[in-house]
Amino acid sequence: MPKPVVAIVGRPNVGKSTLFNRITGSRIAIVEDTPGVTRDRLYHDADWRGCSFTLVDTGGIAVGNDDPLIVQVRRQAEAAVAEADVILFVVDARNGLTADDEEVANLLRRSGRPVILVANKVEDFRDPTPVHEFYRLGLGDPVPISAIHGLNIGDLLDRIVELLPRFHEVDDGEALRVAVVGRPNVGKSSIVNRLLGEERVIVSDLPGTTRDAIDTYIRRDEKEYVLIDTAGMRRKSRIVNATEHYSVLRTLKAVERSDVVLLILDGTEGVTEQDKKIAGYGHELGKASIIVVNKWDLVPKDDKTVVRYEEIIRRELSFMTYAPILFISALTGQRVARILPTVDAVGAAAARRVATSTLNDVVREAIMLTPPPAVKGQAVKIYYATQVKVKPPTFVFFCNRPDDVHFSYQRYLENQLRQAFGFEGTPLRLLFRQSKG
């Protein structure tokens, strides 16, 4: 059974993201004075006195604004309300009650969900006057807090726990974490929504719409995944503000904690220098990877288009020839169904262990077919090998002259391991250590 959900809602710039970070003990929600920084639903697990729940941060609900992006933000907040077991309605005690607060209160009353009215930015807890006017909203006693200073958060959490349904936690440690990365506007959020079968993250033609790394849990065919939609990563010279800088840092953190990386390319633009840099992050961290070419429906084709495109990708991303390539269209759904089975395959490859005896049978045969070249008349001898790690699979080769094993021979051994054991989609690490045999 899923954990109960607590949604934080309110108009822009009332401190929702600060409260989210305070309760979860994290810094994953961007906090700035600029209204509208939080746009998608942002999820994180929290725990209070043995009660676990999922907290959802939402974009500010701006009433009476028909800007398309603002409308989508409002829809995301409404979707969070619809799935919530408890709602935290945050208001600004410093600025007082506004007409927008009243409109949001009307929306929450129609939801039928339990609502806790949270009066943030209280400066003097001995003076109840600043919160009195919020009784007019008809949502019960306001809970005064200061999210930025962490004051009265414990009392708020006690109220939350009182209203939550009881929950027996199920271990979800088997879920594959999949980071969806790429340049801005290549279709990352559209792909995530297509995989989910719903509009969970905001899709817009404006680059930079996604600013947080957004975790979404899904279950398909008895298998569990956590999809991490990330902010588009621009070149450093194009990062113009602090919000975007921290978005890039969150994307890198998302790659670090992932099991599989989906590198999204724009099929209409080919492989750019920034694509190479983004691909390099996952490769250097040893992450299993899949190259996903999106917008394939917009690419003019003949009978050799796929072959030519694959040749270009393999040439431009020559350091990750192990990664499978998928040609999809998030807009039409073309071949999107192949993504999760491929995630399963490369995730399994990254976690694969090879028995030492079987490994050494393959290594001995490879050495017999092509012995390592001698260096300055001195023979290089490899005695045996063992696997010491997974994610990525890491092998240690014990030999007499480890520094003289040429790069080309290391690549030969890697190819032999791949031919024998598969390992599609994951980098391999080959280490050479001194041994007297």
Image: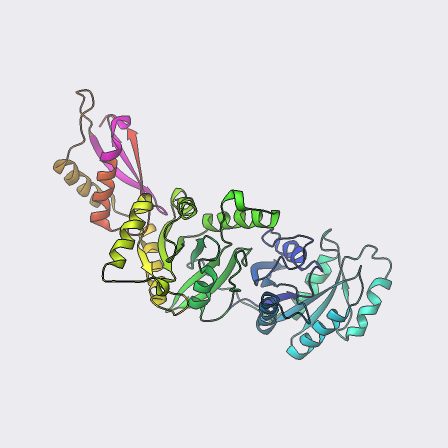
> Residue 406 in magenta?
yes
Quadrant location, the C terminus: top left
Location of residue 48 (image quadrant): bottom right
Location of residue 53 (image quadrant): bottom right
Camera-side residue of 184 and 31: 184
Count the marks.
0
Location of residue 307 (image quadrant): bottom left
Which residue lies at the image location 23% right of the left edge and 44% below the top edge?
A: 417
Camera-side residue of 41 and 32: 32
Answer above or below: position of 405 versus 124.
above
> Residue 416 in magenta?
no
Which residue lies at the image location 51% right of the left edge and 64% below the top edge?
A: 203
Q: Position of residue 120 (x, y in %)?
A: 75, 60
Task: Tell me: 282 left or right of 364.
Answer: right
Q: Position of residue 283 (x, y in %)?
A: 38, 45
Q: Position of residue 185 (x, y in %)?
A: 47, 58
Asked if one can make out residue 160 in the rendered structure from this viewpoint, the answer is yes
In this view, which residue lies farthest toward the top? 376
In this view, which residue lies farthest toward the left? 369
Answer above or below: position of 187 versus 197.
above
Q: How is the image coloured?
A: rainbow
Query: In the rendered structure, which segment of residues is drawn in magenta?
Result: 382-409
Which residue lies at the image location 21% right of the left edge and 32% below the top edge?
A: 383
Asked if one can make out residue 351 in the rendered structure from this viewpoint, the answer is no
Task: Tell me: 375 left or right of 10.
Answer: left
